[in-house]
Image (cartoon, coloured by chain):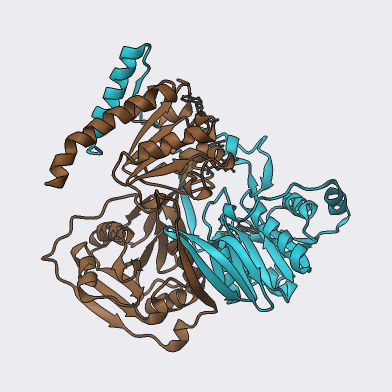
Chain colours: A cyan, B brown
Amino acid sequence: MKIIVPIKQVPETSNVKMDPETGTMIREGVEPIVNPLDLYAIEAAIRLKEHAGGEIIALTMGPPSARKALTEAIAMGCDDGILLSNKKFAGADTWSTSYVLSQAIKKIGRYDLILCGERATDGDTGQVGPGIAAWLDIPFMTYISKIMEVAENEIRCERMVETGYEILAAELPCLLTVVKEVNFPRLPTLRGKLRSRAVELQTWGPVDIDAQPDFLGLKGSPTRVVKITKPQVARRGKIAAPKDEGELVTAVDGLIEFLKQKEIV
Amino acid sequence: MGTKVMYQNVWILGEQEVGTVRQVSFELLKRGRALADKRESQLVAVVMGDHLAENELQRLIHYGADCVIAVERPELRHFLPEPYTSVLTVLIRKYRPEILIASATTTGRTVAPAVAVVCHTGLTADCTELDIEPETGNLIQTRPAIGGNILATIKTPAHRPQMATVRPHSNKPLEPDESRRGEIIRETVNATNLQSRIKRLGFRENSEAVGNIQDAEIIIAGGKGFKKDENFRMVRQLAELFPDGAIGATRDAVDRGWISYNHQIGLSGKTVSPRFYLAIGISGSVQHLAGIKTAENIAAINNDPEAQIFQVADYGIVADLFEVLPLIKERLATLNLKQEPEVSE
Ligand SMILES: Cc1cc2nc3c(=O)[nH]c(=O)nc-3n(C[C@H](O)[C@H](O)[C@H](O)COP(=O)(O)OP(=O)(O)OC[C@H]3O[C@@H](n4cnc5c(N)ncnc54)[C@H](O)[C@@H]3O)c2cc1C
Ligand SMILES: Nc1ncnc2c1ncn2[C@@H]1O[C@H](COP(=O)(O)O)[C@@H](O)[C@H]1O
C-alpha cells in the first residue's frame, strides 16, 4: 500500500503574540511545528503500513524551513518526504495549494491512499484535502473518525457528522481527511530520528511538477486577504466575586436573573 | 469559468435530512436575503435530496428565498461528496450565480471546496460576517484565523461565483412569512452526475444521551477545574436541567477521558454558537475561545479571578465550582417546578 500524507508546518498557536498596532502575528520566537491535526493522518498511515506493508511519503508545500516538518514525519515512521518549495508558490490560498499538491501527487505516480489532517490550525479551513481530491478526480471522505478495514480495492471508514457516524466504503485510490478521534499519534523514536537524518529529501519546484504558472502563489489564488484586524473579545460583563456564603447566594441569584433576562430559562 | 460576466443572484446551499430542511438552511437564508437586497438581486435556495415535498420547499420561500431549485433523486438522499459536487457544479454552470454560500457543516465544508476547485473560484471558510459592495457585487468575507487571534477580511475579486461557508448558528433565521410567494424549479440531471465511488453502508447515531452540540442552544461546558472523572458528571446533571442543554468540554477534559472527543470545543474541536454558554472550571485559552466566539451569551465560573475566560464573559462568578454548582442546580430545579404546571396544561 502506497500512502501519501500532505502535512503543513504551522506556527505554535497556543502562545501566539499579536502586534496590537498592526494586528499581525509576531513571528519571532514562535516555534514552527507540524500541524497538530496532521499527526493523526501520519499515525493512521503508519498503522495501515504496519498492517498491510507498503510505503509512506510525506509531502509539504512551504518555505525551505518546512523541511523540518518532513524530518519529523520520517522520525515518526514515514519512509520519505518531498518538499515543495519555491518563491512562485508563496502566498497561495487553498485553491492554489491544493493544485500544487495535486500536481506533486501526479508526479509521484501510483498511490492507494492520500491522508490529510482535518484542517491546519493556522488557516483553519479544511479545504485543501477535498480540493486535492477534486483536482485528482478521486473519491474523498472527510471527518474520518475510524478506519475499519482496508481490502484490495476498498477502504471502510466511519465519518463523524453532526448527528452521528456514517459508515462508508470508498474505492481506492481515495483521499481521507481524519479527525482527532481516529487514533493517538506516537512520538518519534530515537531510531526514527536517526533514520530521518539519513533520508535525503527532494525539493520540487513548479517545473518539476509541471505546474501551470498562472495557478501558482498569490497571483494564482482566487481569494485575497484585504484586511487583518484584532478580534474584540472583551465583553466586559458583570463579574461577581463573592467573599462569603451570603454573597455567593447573591451571585447565583444574579446568574439566574441574567438567564431570565436573556430568556434562557 | 472564472470571468465575471453574466453572473447574477445569491445562492444558498440548503441541507435536508430525510426530506426535512435543516435549521442551518434557514439561517443562511437570512444572510443571503441581506446580500441579495443590497445588491438588488434574487435569492435562490438550492436543495438536493430524495423526497423533497412541495410544502417543505415552500418553507424556504417563507424564510426569505425568491426561488428554490430542487434536485430530487434517490442517489441524493444522503450526502455523498461526488454526486453533490457534480450536481451543484452542473447547476452553477447553467444558472451562473454571483455568490454561493453554504453552511460550515460537515456537508458544506466537504462539498464547497471540491466545487470551488472544479469551478475555478475562491472559497472562504467558516465566515462569521458577510457583506457586499453593491456596485461591484464583491462579497466581503470576514473570518477568524490563527487560532482566533486575528480576524481576516477576504475578497474574491476576479472569480465567480464567490463562495463562502458560514458558521452554523452565527445568526438566527428571519421570522417566516407564509404570504411570501416564489418559484420552485425542479431540475433533472444526467445519471453520470449521480455516480459515486463511495457507498454509504450505514449510520450510527450519537450514543451520548446529550447529543449534537453544534446545534445546541444551550451548552454547559466543563474543564480541568472539575479535577476528577466522577466530578465531571456534575456538568451533565446541570445540562439536564435546561431544555435541550448540551455538554461541552475543553481539550484537557477530553484528554483526561472524562468525555468523548465530539464534545470538545475549540480550535481542534467544534465551533459552537449557542444562545447560552456556561464555562465551568475553564481557563479560557485562546484555542478554547476560538470555538465560542459566536456564542450569544457567555457565563463563567472559575475560582481564579485572573482567568482569561472572564474577559469574554457577560456574567462571571469568581468562586469554587463545587460550592456554586449545587446552588445553581437548586435554583434551576425550583424554577422548573414552578414552570411545570404551565407545560402540562
Ligand atoms: C494547537 C492546539 C489546539 C488546541 N485546541 C484546543 C481545543 O480545541 N479546545 C480546547 O479546549 N483546548 C485546546 N487546546 C488546549 C488549550 O491550550 C488549553 O490547554 C485548554 O483549553 C485548557 O483547558 P481547561 O480550561 O480545561 O484547563 P486549565 O487551563 O487547566 O483551566 C482549568 C481552570 O479551572 C479553574 N479551576 C480549578 N479548580 C476550580 C474550582 N474548584 N472551581 C472553579 N474553578 C476551578 C482554574 O482556575 C483554571 O482556570 C489546544 C492547544 C493547542 C496547542
Ligand atoms: N502547504 C501544505 N502542504 C501540505 N499539506 C497541506 C498544506 N496545507 C494544507 N495541507 C493539508 O490539508 C489539510 C487541511 O489544511 P487547510 O485546508 O489549510 O485547513 C492539512 O491538515 C494538511 O493535511
The number of discs equals: 0
Residue at the far top: name it: A244
Q: Position of residue B194 (x, y in %)?
A: 45, 82
Query: Quick check: B156 left or right of A119?
Result: left
Please state which of residues A200 and B321 is positioned toward the viewer in this rendering: B321
Image position of A207 with respect to B191: above or below: above
Please state the horizontal and vertical placement of residue B245, each as a whole percent of the image: 34, 44
Nearer to me, A137 or B145: A137
**Residue B24 horizontal side relative to residue A22, left or right:** left
Q: Give the residue drawn at x 63%, y 76%.
A: A154
> Which residue is found at the position 49% from the left and 56% from the top?
A224
Q: Residue B143's x, y, as percent?
A: 44, 49
On the image, the x and y values in percent for residue B301 come to 41, 27
- Name which quarter of the figure residue A28 lies in: top right
**Quadrant placement of the C terminus of chain A:** top left
Quadrant of ligand 2 in image: bottom right
Q: Classify the position of the N terminus of chain A by image quarter.
A: bottom right
The front one of B181 and B204 is: B204
